[in-house]
Amino acid sequence: MKSLLIPSRSQTRRWLPLAAAALPIVFALGCASPGPPHAPSLNLPEVVKDLTAERVGDSVTLHWTTPEKTTDHLAIKGIITAEICRATLPAPTSTPACTVVKHLPVKSGPSQADEALPPALTADPASLLAYKVQLFNAHNRSAGSSSEAFAAAGAAPPPVEQLRATSVREGIQLEWQQPKGVSPGNSQVQLDRHLVASTTTTPTPAPANSASSTAPKPALRSKSRKASPPSAFASAKPQATLSTSPKTPDDVKLETPKQAADAGGTIDQTTQKGGSYRYTARRIRTLSLAGHALEVRSEVSAPITITMLDTFPPAIPTGLEAVPGGATASDRSIDLSWTPNTDADLAGYSVYRQEVTPTGQVAGPATRLNPSPIVGPAYRDQTAIPGHRYAYRVTAVDATGNESAPSADVQETLREQ
């Protein structure tokens, strides 16, 4: 027969404190509150917050950022479908219907959708279009539509055709075919310029006293994220003031003023000598609809590329005068002076001399008196022979080596003493 083991009195005394200490833990566990229950996530994508619309040609392009999180701040699971709707304002009712025009699958991050407008919305009169985007999860549920983004319906300006470029003294002359007929509304031409390659950082000068530069240089409105000196533009045909907006040192936007008549050309005076540039152009029509300032852009033109070659001489020097100089026989000379040129890349001047016969005829070849360009607008000819009469001319030379045509000549005789 098995005997039953009964703890001794001393063993019982040792276990009692341990059991007493464990009782509060047992009661605490038994009375713990489970907290409020959590509802399962509906996996609804967050609402789009940055929808924008841009009208180009006969299409509207929408841009937005598709969120990464749900309304419960969890990662989105499954496929996301974007639904685009469009309303035309003003509508016959107070609450215009937003007609669904497109469905497309999207992923988190930058997203885009394009809508080709129906013919009724690509003809005048212009009207206001309001777009919304709504994101649906795999169960076709959504947290709601985005705020409206606006675009303009109506006729788009015609694209820029036959864009061409030529290097001229003031910079790069850009010309294009003027549109046939009347363009819808006031429009301007926007040129996008990209610096392909550069061999120098010397700005193209805008000569102030050049006989071949007669077009005025209107002041330029400059909008730059980096500090840059103000520049100027002049139109190739009717005068037009342009504005420039550099996005980066290599990319610049040039805009003609808003006007009903297309000038058909302009001159970019902000180019650099030796630089190769690629240009594209488009027309922009500006509208104000229900308090919204909107643009309708034409399709972009075919690109052209040109290198700004410095083959243009500086301005011809003016105001040349000659007087006999020197107080003694040892320092006798004919002293020349002229009006200084203002060309930004001027290297100096060259002085030429020819003999004059007793009958007043210039004879023989012209001789250059200085081996290198003279920096200042003055020269002292100490090689003249007393009693001889000479004809003098001056030319200007730029840093590239281009030489101007000679100035008007002056004649002077070195006196015999």
Image (cartoon, rainbow, N blue to C red):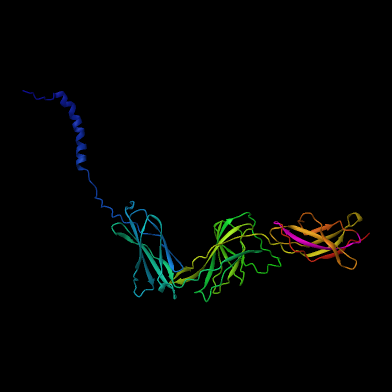
Between 227 and 185, the residue placed more toward the observer is 185
Horizontally, is 170 left or right of 394 in the view? left
- The C terminus - image quarter: bottom right
Which residue reaches farthest right? 417
How many numbered dots are placed on residues in this image? 0
* Residue 174 is inside the magenta segment: no
Q: What percent of the width, then of the height, locates residue 251?
A: 55, 58
Residue 30 position within the rendered picture, expressed as x and y whole percent measured from the top left:
19, 41
Judge by depth and name the residue closer to the eye, 109 or 199: 199
The x, y position of residue 412, in whole percent, is: 86, 64
Magenta segment's dominant SS is: strand
Snapshot quadrant of residue 249: bottom right
Residue at point 20% right, 34% down?
22
Residue 148, position in %: x, y? 39, 65
Task: Identify the residue at image location x=22%, y=43%.
Answer: 32
Q: Identify the magenta region.
A: 386-400
Q: Residue furthest left?
A: 1
Residue 1 shown left or right of residue 250 in the figure:
left
Along the horizontal axis of the image, is 210 left or right of 296? right
Q: Which residue occupies the foreground of this view, 111 or 230?
A: 111
**Can you tell which quarter of the image residue 267 is in?**
bottom right
Q: Quadrant of the N terminus?
A: top left
